């Protein structure tokens, strides 16, 4: 994990691969190696590891989200949506799933669905980053007033949340 945290993804992949050889039934090894592949934008390898992790994990919901993110970054939104749906079917209160699906909707410029999913993620876990991201969806959909409200809310939760200051500052630029 140290190599991953330091951004040494190739070394992290080697470490996780050794771990997997020793503990081939542990979903965390595949998840962690998949995260390292994802960070390197090696999406096919990440998808492969996340698929194995889904088969091994007790809590499969987050593993589906991990794979959905890789599909989304590959531009395979249909497969990503399918995995987000699987994650939410397993755990309807998975804020991580709603948040990441919201982000994918924003990327494909479906801001109404993006805001809807950010709303759900905020209802479950109202952390500053979710308000900032929903603010971005509001901004790009043309609702500058609601965007500002969300940036303000993020700052009321954490006065040191830098991206809220940044996006609020450029909102009217």
Image (cartoon, rainbow, N blue to C red):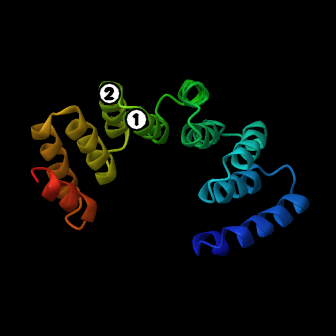
In the rendered image, residue 25, in percent from the top left (x then y), is placed at: 85, 49
In the image, residue 144 above or below residue 11: above
Q: Identify residue for label 1.
A: 102
Residue at 23% over, 32% down: 141
Q: Gap between marks 2 and 1, in whole Å?
A: 8 Å
Q: Is residue 100 visible?
A: yes
Residue at 23% over, 61% down: 158
- Counting residues from the start of the chain, the first of labels 2 and 1 encountered is 1
Is the C-beta separation of discs 2 and 1 under 8 Å? yes
In the rendered image, residue 164, in percent from the top left (x then y), is placed at: 22, 57
In the image, residue 122 above or below residue 88: below
- On-image quarter of the C terminus: bottom left
Residue at 41% over, 39% down: 103
Element assignment for label 2: helix
Q: Identify residue for label 2.
A: 116
In the rendered image, residue 81, in percent from the top left (x then y), is placed at: 54, 27
Q: Residues within 10 Å of mark 1 (few under 14, many from 20)?
A: many
Please state which of residues 44 and 126 is positioned toward the viewer in this rendering: 44
98 lies left or right of 118: right
Q: Is residue 161 visible?
A: no
132 lies left or right of 172: right
């Amino acid at each position: 994990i140290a190599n991953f945290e330091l951004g040494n993804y190739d070394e992290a992949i080697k470490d996780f691969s050794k771990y997997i050889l020793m503990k081939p039934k542990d979903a965390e090894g595949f998840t962690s190696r998949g995260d390292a592949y994802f960070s390197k934008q090696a999406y096919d390898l990440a998808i492969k590891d996340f698929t194995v992790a889904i088969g091994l994990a007790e809590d499969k919901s987050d593993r589906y989200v991990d794979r959905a993110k890789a599909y989304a970054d590959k531009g395979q939104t249909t497969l990503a949506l399918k995995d987000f749906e699987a994650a939410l079917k397993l755990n309807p209160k998975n804020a991580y799933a709603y948040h990441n699906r919201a982000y994918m909707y924003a990327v494909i410029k479906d801001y109404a669905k993006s805001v809807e999913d950010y709303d759900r993620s905020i209802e479950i876990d109202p952390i500053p980053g979710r308000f900032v991201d929903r603010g971005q969806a509001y901004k790009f959909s043309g609702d500058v007033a609601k965007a500002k409200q969300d940036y303000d809310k993020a700052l009321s939760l954490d006065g040191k949340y830098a991206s809220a200051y940044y996006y609020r500052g450029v909102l009217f630029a």
